[in-house]
Image (cartoon, helix red, strand yellow):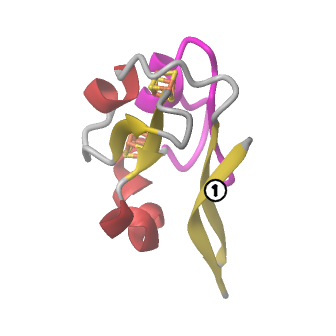
Amino acid sequence: MLANYGYSDGSGTYYITLDTDKCDGCRDCVTACPQQMFLVEPDDYDDDKAVIKEAMRKDVKYLCAPCKPTAGPRELPCETACTPRAIVHSW
Ligand code: SF4
Ligand code: SF4
């Protein structure tokens, strides 16, 4: 399942998508994110899965800005840390 955390406004679409089929609950994103946006918690089936903390979901554009270069290749700490490649940013 794809779980989307974020929002759209007049300036664009800002979602972090977590693929719960790929996420193995390793917590590497929790360690890697300088803004401490990730939490790993049991889902409905008691499997550990990453989520974006609720209080941060309306601010993802601003919280992630320091990680995102305005030009050239980018390597986001969360995406790089996630070996199963379960994390995708929409912007
Ligand atoms: S690093 Fe990837 S696989 Fe590990 S908990 Fe985070 S999202 Fe899931
Ligand atoms: S881009 Fe940076 S701040 Fe945003 S979730 Fe990834 S590691 Fe955290």
Coordinates of residue 21 in the picture (x, y in percent): 70, 27
Tally the numbered discs.
1
Q: Which residues are magenta?
A: 69-91
Q: Is residue 17 left or right of residue 61?
A: right
Coordinates of residue 52 in the picture (x, y in percent): 42, 51
Where residue 26 sits, quadrant-wise, is: top left
Q: Nearer the viewer, residue 8 or 45?
A: 45
Q: Which residue is tagged 1?
A: 4
Q: Is residue 17 left or right of residue 6?
A: right
Q: Nearer the viewer, residue 27 or 66?
A: 27
Q: Nearer the viewer, residue 83 or 91?
A: 83
Q: Quadrant of the N terminus?
A: top right
Residue at 35% x, 23% y is 27
Q: Is residue 34 left or right of residue 89?
A: left
Q: Is residue 75 above or below residue 84?
A: below
| Callout 1 crowding tier (Cα within 10 Å): few <14, some 14–19, many ≥20 | some
Q: Nearer the viewer, residue 49 or 46?
A: 46
Q: Is residue 14 above or below residue 20?
A: below
Q: Is mark 1 within 8 Å of ligand 2?
A: no
Whether residue 14 can be seen here: yes
Coordinates of residue 64 in the picture (x, y in percent): 41, 53
Q: Is residue 82 magenta?
A: yes
Residue at 31% x, 68% y is 55
Circle 1: residue type = Asn
**Residue at the limit of the structure toward the right, as seen here:** 1
Q: Quadrant of the C terminus?
A: bottom right
Q: Is residue 75 above or below residue 43?
A: above
Tag 1, which secondary structure?
strand
Coordinates of residue 14 in the picture (x, y in percent): 61, 64
**Residue at the limit of the structure toward the front, as seen here:** 45
Residue at 64% x, 34% y is 20
Does the magenta stretch mainly form a helix, a strand or a loop? Answer: loop
